[in-house]
Amino acid sequence: MYPPLPAVVKNDLQALLAALSHAPADDRLELNLSSLQWDTLAAYLQPLSLVSGEVLFQKGMLDRTLYLVESGTLSVHLEDDKGRLRLAMVGAGSVVGEGAFFSHQPRSATVQANNACQLWTLHPLRFTELANRQPPLALALSLALGSVMARRMRQRRRRVAST
């Protein structure tokens, strides 16, 4: 039904796996997958490098791409109704872009690299392919992302991080 995906080198996500295991629990992407599942997921992800100061996306963009943070720190900022800047930091082992990924709404904040960052992107079309080909894996990822969002919503200072 679907053509096979290209093979991916198993070690591609090793640094991401290490980041996930060492990230602070309050913002960690808790995605407990087998080696085979990680290898499968790797085929749907694309690497992205950012230099310090580079903007990943801006508030109001209509993009639903999800980003898994392997290394570096991203600042999430916006201005509230009184013109004040609100800020959250997202580091290795977490995600950004999950709000628009789920809501189909414009980005709620601007995200910028605080320093050099290595990310893994998951485009909505690739997630749809994942859901069609590997439903249990897509469900596990969705639940892990939902958990990050729920933790961020409970922490007033981290709410801005749900982008």
Image: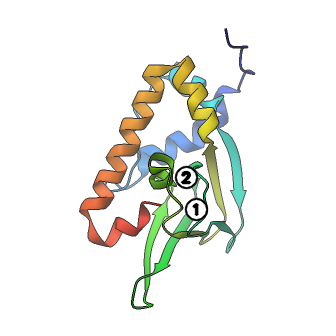
Label 1: few (<14), some (14–19) or many (≥20) C-alpha neighbours in 10 Å = many
The residue sitting at 72% across, 67% down in the picture is 51
Q: In x, y percent, where is residue 152?
A: 32, 59
**Vertical arrangement, residue 155 with respect to residue 127, above or below:** below
Residue sitting nearer the eye, 94 or 15: 94
The residue sitting at 36% across, 50% down in the picture is 148
Label 2: few (<14), some (14–19) or many (≥20) C-alpha neighbours in 10 Å = many
**Vertical arrangement, residue 114 with respect to residue 106, above or below:** below
Label ID, residue 69: 2
Q: Are marks 2 and 1 in contact (CB under 8 Å)?
A: yes
Residue 130 shows in the view: yes
Q: In x, y percent, where is residue 2?
A: 68, 13
Label ID, residue 129: none
Indicate which label's residue lies in the foreground, 2 or 1.
Answer: 2
The residue sitting at 38% across, 40% down in the picture is 144
> Which quarter shows the N terminus?
top right
What residue is disc 1 on?
Answer: 72
What is the C-alpha distance between the residues marked 2 and 1?
A: 7 Å
**Label 1 SS:** loop
**Left or right of residue 6, residue 81 in this image:** left
Given the image, on which type of amino acid does mark 2 rest? Val
**Label 2 SS:** strand
The quadrant where residue 86 appears? bottom left
Q: In x, y percent, where is residue 65?
A: 60, 49
The quadrant where residue 161 appears? bottom left
Given the image, on which type of amino acid does mark 1 rest? Gly
The quadrant where residue 55 appears? bottom right
Q: In x, y percent, where is residue 18?
A: 51, 43
Count of labels shown? 2
